[in-house]
Amino acid sequence: MHGYAGKILLINLTTEEITVLNTSDYEEWGGGHGIGSKLFWDLVPDKTISCFDPANVVTIMSSPLSGTMVPGASSRTEVQGIGSQTYPEWFTRSNFGGRFSAMLKYAGWDGIAVTGKASKPVWIDIRNDDVQIRDADGLWGEGTWETQKKIWEYVTGEPVINDWLEFASGETAVRTTQRPAVLTIGLAGETLSRMACLIHDAGAAAGQGGFGAVWGSKNLKAVSVIGTGSITIADPDELLSSRLWAQREYGNDLYHPEASAWTWFGVDGKDQMMWKTGGNARLHACIGCHRGCHERSEKAFKNESMCSETYLFVYAGQEAINNDTEETYRPTYLAQSLGLNANEIIKGYSYIKALYQMGVMGPGKEIDCDLPFDKLDTLEFMEKLYDLIISRKGVGDDMAEGFYRAAERWGRLEKDLGTNLLYYAYWGMPTHSSYDPRAEVHWGYGTILGDRDINEHDFCFIFWKNFTTKGNPPLDAETVVKIVTDKMEPYNGDLFMLDASTENIYSDHVAKLVAWHRHYTRFWKESALYCDNRWPDFVNTKAPDNKGLSGEGEPRFYNAVTGKKLSFADGVALGQKIWNLDNAIWTLQGRHRDMVRFEEFIYQEPFAGRGGPDTNYILPWFENGTWSYRKVNGRFLDKQKVEEFKTRFYELEGWDTATGWPRRSTLESQGLDYVADALEEKGKLGAP
Amino acid sequence: MSEKTHQERTSLNTITRREFIKYSGMAVIGACVVGCKGGPGGKVEVNWGFLLVDMKKCQGCMSCMLACSLTHHGVENLSLSRIQVLQNPFEAWPNDLTLVQCRQCVKPSCVAVCPTRALSYDPAYGNVTTVDITKCIGCRRCVSACSYQPSRAIWNFEEGHSQKCDLCAYTPHWNEKGGPEGKQACREICPLGAIVFTKVIPDQEGDDGYNVNLRGEEWARLGYPTD
């Protein structure tokens, strides 16, 4: 089993029983999400339980590529289980970078499954084969950064690590210079906030899903792992030569950055940070990655944060993006330290600010609270807001449940969703900024047909390249559409998958786009764990004919590591199988097609109707026999047509169009007979 | 001492033949007879060579470590890598990261203490010091003798012998010519070009000769400091 460690750790916190599972029993699922879904299927007999039920299982999975030099695939860790964030609570997923999964593999484990509930706060200490459940006295109540520092010192016995550390002694002694990789919750998780994340190192976070609260409910503060073992590689020379080939032919060239301007694989990583970058800092990368996307700075509180969390400053009163003051980065640091989901905080902040300005929220108002609204848009306000959420005092108790549930408690849910005041388009989650369902329909469809804001940027480079060039990207729409769709096996060749025209967005073509996207990501990105920030590489202006690495790259690296002969299409097909297992789990949880919907504002409010940068949302558009780039702002989705789209999608997937439940024939065609049996037993099997 | 560019440093801090002999001592003179020569400007070159790194440019991806263990051992294992990156993600730049490579010392204490002469100058590869694992008895004196922290002589606890950077002279899992006249995997894979190879002897005192400035205009374009 090249690439695999060979064992999966099952820890029952109630009984303190530690069990070793053989990875080979799960190898057919590839790794990451695939194995996590199958573990969940096997270990949670009653899928209808609450996320806070001790029987809920949280899986933390690596892939065969974790801890290897596969570019943009070494660092990701997939987290699954019934999450606390969505409404209702779905079996869901999250994913983070850094070095946790790599260290897990070096320790000899492909993953961890945690079930049960400890009688008091604990943390899990993994040192290669030695696994201990330890008392979390002294850690419970600490921030995520402080917790990690304390665990490092406990495990290594050293306050400062600058030498070889030796574990065990004598003939069994092993050595490393590395700190343990720790995944931990902060106060948000301890207080069961549904906005609570899992944090690793300075800025890596499993942010969506509310897994911090699930850990908190299990009295699990942290998991620490230090490993010194080896991951065997099927073809080392092929792996290294492939890495060098990809880096050379498709990667960013520091000396000629313009050459690789249009690509995910070779993108200049700094554009992933919203605040001012550069200065006394370094570009920093996760383990094994060819291109860093975050920084470590002389202002250490900024370290390793990227994307949405670096946007918190906008709402803390920093009008200018070039400000680089403590006010800029402290709200981010606090969110990281408390383990709070920045994406929810950003949307929630806008919401309560609007409620205040409407005279609804504030001292003595309908929503009575003592937040210092006279200091809106200041660091002081942000700190008070965080304090209120963490303490669960007053309305803080409501907000700790996430702003969707808070609005429900305040009796404003329907009203504020209808007016778009609460910008939550699906599953009680914030609409992902820019990638609004009315613009990027595949993002919206994928989200409602799944379990969460998909947060998969595979096709979004088309928008970004248009956005950053003000509608004059280096490649014309038809060229881009051809390059991308040519790679989308088994639906390759259907250009209209990427036709964003309003007429086409409910079509069979877009159903194929959404299906391909679900299948591709389920395996290649969430099971093989290729990073969303570097893959897929559809279009690459550095490469011949501008054709990116994807299609060839994913299986080439996977096979070099594992020795398998998986094709790109094989991976997509395995993704479809994983996707079907997920849908079976959701079906058992109570999913029905009637629940698969957007909130009303998506059907009523025009996209970007209030102005802002989204008014320049430009995508490929086919009209009168010609491809062009066109703005998609101003449109909203047609509710009836969305329903028709769902029917098309279900038919394409082989699911019952009346319920959205899987059909036996579909499941059996994928070797999931036992899943069909379980659904039938519960009366949830789709009609033939 | 302020940093200089790599070019400046090699001209400012290389040592003279007289200094080289002073540093090297008698143990190295034998190797020098076939392994060193005077270079331009009085620089002393050797046949083996040295890896120089830029700790401020390093992005901490540890690809160099992964390449090292892969090419030498066919596995991914940070502990077996002969180049090490130590990091503290909570520390402020530039103290968040230390990148340490074997210095290929002109007076290598690891060689001097080996009781079985398992560590020796390898004439097949320009007299780079290597470990003959058939002679290594696992006493780890070389690991302890390394003057630098963490030790650049590595204890391979999986196979029970010492090892050190051989400039990729012996990389059975890589179909490329390595060693002083070939490629070094860590240098090849570094995405930012934070590792270079030279045959000019770096300043043997302190770390400045080995930790150089490899940041140029392209680095300034990214907005990071080049001084």
Image (cartoon, grey):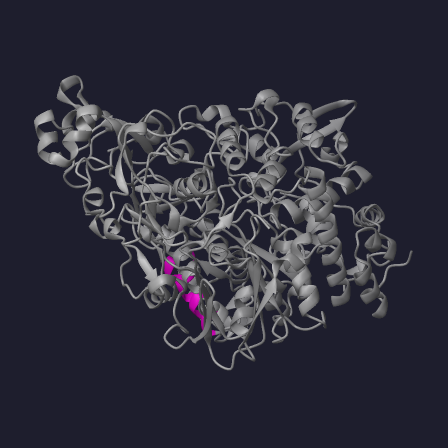
Q: Quadrant of residue A160?
A: bottom left
Q: Can residue A83 be seen from the camera position used here?
A: yes
In what quadrant of the picture does the C terminus of chain A appear? bottom right
B223 to A116, vertically: above or below: above
Out of A572 and B80, give the one closest to the viewer.
B80
Q: In the rendered structure, which segment of residues is drawn in magenta?
A: A376-391
Residue B65: horizontal and vertical position, in percent? 39, 43
Out of A20 and A675, give the one closest to the viewer.
A20
Secondary structure mostly seen in magenta is: helix
Residue in view at x 39 percent, y 72 percent? A139
A474 to B65, vertically: above or below: above
Residue A4: horizontal and vertical position, in percent? 56, 52
Residue B127: horizontal and vertical position, in percent? 26, 30
Residue in view at x 53 percent, y 61 percent? A352
Most extreme residue toward the right, as rendered? A688
Left-right relation of A530 to B50 = right
Residue A383 inside the magenta-drawn segment: yes
Most extreme residue toward the top, as rendered? B40
